[in-house]
Image (cartoon, helix red, strand yellow):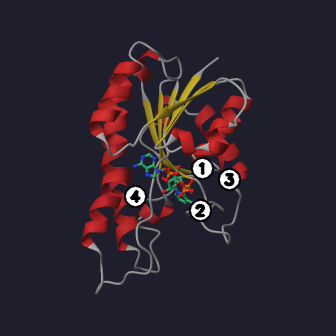
Amino acid sequence: MPTVLITGASRGLGLEFARQYADDGWSVIASCRQPKKAKSLNAVAGDVTVMALDVDDLAKVKALARKLKGRGIDVLINNAGIYGPKGLTRDNVDYDAWGRVFRTNAMSPLAVSAAFAANVAQGRQKKIVTLSSIMGSIDSNTDGKKYIYRSSKAAVNAVMKSLSLDLAAKGIKVVMLHPGWVRTDMGGPKGAIDAAQSVTGMRAVIAGLKKSDSGRFLNYEGTEIPW
Ligand SMILES: NC(=O)c1ccc[n+]([C@@H]2O[C@H](COP(=O)([O-])OP(=O)(O)OC[C@H]3O[C@@H](n4cnc5c(N)ncnc54)[C@H](OP(=O)(O)O)[C@@H]3O)[C@@H](O)[C@H]2O)c1
């Protein structure tokens, strides 16, 4: 069966990815910051290996890649993400927090992708998926604000577009997905859909990815999102 590596699998969409792929019989490498505290993840049935990984810790990212050296990964999912402080305006931006959000949302997905690119090249499906957001779509921004989160997701789109071109020769497909507005800790209780619906949709999109899809920014139902 194929293998998937997921970051930020302790809760929310990452946890749901782990559940659904495990339920389908995949080998799931579910990484999270604090495995001992990840009760829901540890309870997922199936071929699930829970690994410790803070995606912002470059040394740990490289150490995990060394540990998994030689193991093919069909699908790598850069899911870990943070929103940062809410409700900031142009007059009270928290610039330190902005740096932290940028690190997790825009820089760490590249660090993780680079560290595991050799594993993905060894996998049969050769797919790298990054959870972006429609909030990163400059074209879709009609209501302003949210400087920190929006810019971090616009940045990760730019990063992943470059990566899609750089890894094309290895046959690796790289896509950015908007999961919808989902009822998780980040999306809040008013979200439009639940994690199961979002992940079911994203898994269908991932399953159907073709070479020509590499570098695209898609929503969980497979439609294109403008940059
Ligand atoms: N929910 C939505 O409506 C929505 C919409 C658009 C995009 N997204 C994106 O979808 C992804 C998942 O979101 P979600 O709604 O599931 O969020 P969530 O419920 O807040 O969960 C975030 C996950 O990321 C993990 N994480 C954060 N920083 C990490 C780090 N440095 N290293 C490793 N793991 C880290 C968290 O781990 P801990 O438990 O250790 O904190 C948690 O497992 C994010 O990239 C988010 O930006 C979500």
Residue that lies at the very extreme toward the top in this rendered image: 70
Q: Are marks 1 and 2 in contact (CB under 8 Å)?
A: yes
Indicate which disc, 3 or 4, sits on the residue closer to the N terminus: 4
Instruction: From the image, tell me which residue sits under label 2.
Output: 185
In this rendering, the label closer to the viewer, 3 or 2: 2
Q: Position of residue 12 (x, y in %)?
A: 61, 52
Q: What residue sits 36% from the left and 52% below the top?
A: 104
Indicate which disc, 3 or 2, sits on the residue closer to the N terminus: 2
| Quarter of the rendering containing residue 227 | bottom left
Helix, strand or loop at disc 1? loop
Q: Around disc 4, counting alpha carbons within 10 Å, would you say few (fewer than 14), some (14 to 19), or many (20 or more)? A: many
In this rendering, the label closer to the viewer, 4 or 1: 1
Indicate which disc, 2 or 4, sits on the residue closer to the N terminus: 4
Helix, strand or loop at disc 4? helix
Instruction: From the image, tell me which residue sits under label 4.
Output: 153
Instruction: From the image, tell me which residue sits under label 1.
Output: 11
Q: Position of residue 224 (x, y in %)?
A: 53, 52
